[in-house]
Amino acid sequence: MTLSSFAFYMFATVTVASALMVISARNPVHSVLFLILTFFNSAGIFLLLGAEFLALLLVIVYVGAVAVLFLFVVMMLDIDFVELNEGFLQYLPVGALVGLVLLTELIMVLGGSAMAPDMIAGGPKATTDEMTNAEALGLVLYTDYVFFFQTAGAILLVAMVGAIVLTLQKRDNPKRQSVAAQNARRRDESVEVVKVKPGQGL
């Protein structure tokens, strides 16, 4: 067994085990931590496959933003998880149906690659031998699809501004800071000298 094969099986084993622990752990904080472990090992598998852009995307976006956000939300919100788990059996048939559909799709994909390996191997290559995946993606994204890329950024900006406007709470008497008024204060307006006799308090 080569070193790459050993690394692949190690990453795959830890990924599957941690993914099972995400849905089976009773503590939601532990579930999020296992989710972060799953993302890290999936990034390792992508590195072994030569898809370094997807590996960095998993680590930077999902681990650095989404999973950490989930962790903070779970830790900060006072959620009654006992009450949430009471309706588990109610949604079990729907969950089993969705899982069966996903399992069927995975079997069809794996069966198709096993029955027609020449079709997959002879397909077009995404990159040339002299170009990495990140370079090829950047070349296509910022040349052929630069308009759609900028449009998606503008839509996200509008959505962010809309979320801020919708969640903004207006107050009748808000407290605002006046830097000029603070700098113009004198000592006699800010400090009060009180003489206390010995043995007495304020």
Image: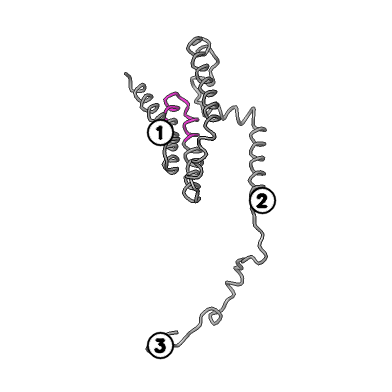
Of residues 49 and 133, the one drawn nearer to the viewer in this rendering: 49
The quarter of the picture where the N terminus appears is: top left
Circle 1 residue? 18
Q: How far apart are marks 1 and 2 (CA)?
A: 38 Å
Work out whether 35 lies above or below 202. above
- Is the C-beta separation of discs 1 and 2 under 8 Å? no
Question: Callout 2: helix, strand or loop?
Answer: helix
Question: Callout 3: helix, strand or loop?
Answer: loop
Circle 2 residue? 166
Magenta part of the chain: 44-58
Crowding at label 3, few (<14), some or many (≥20) Cα neighbours within 10 Å?
few
Residue type at numbered disc 3: Gln
Left or right of 17 in this view: 112: right
Residue type at numbered disc 1: Ser
**Farthest-out residue, left:** 1
Majority secondary structure of magenta residues: helix
Q: Residue at x 67, y 65 (%)?
A: 172
Q: Position of residue 180 (x, y in %)?
A: 61, 70
Identify the colour scheme used.
Answer: one colour
Residue type at numbered disc 2: Leu
Q: Is 45 inside the magenta-drawn segment? A: yes
Q: Residue 200 carries which label?
A: 3
- Is the C-beta separation of discs 1 and 3 under 8 Å? no
Question: Callout 1: helix, strand or loop?
Answer: helix
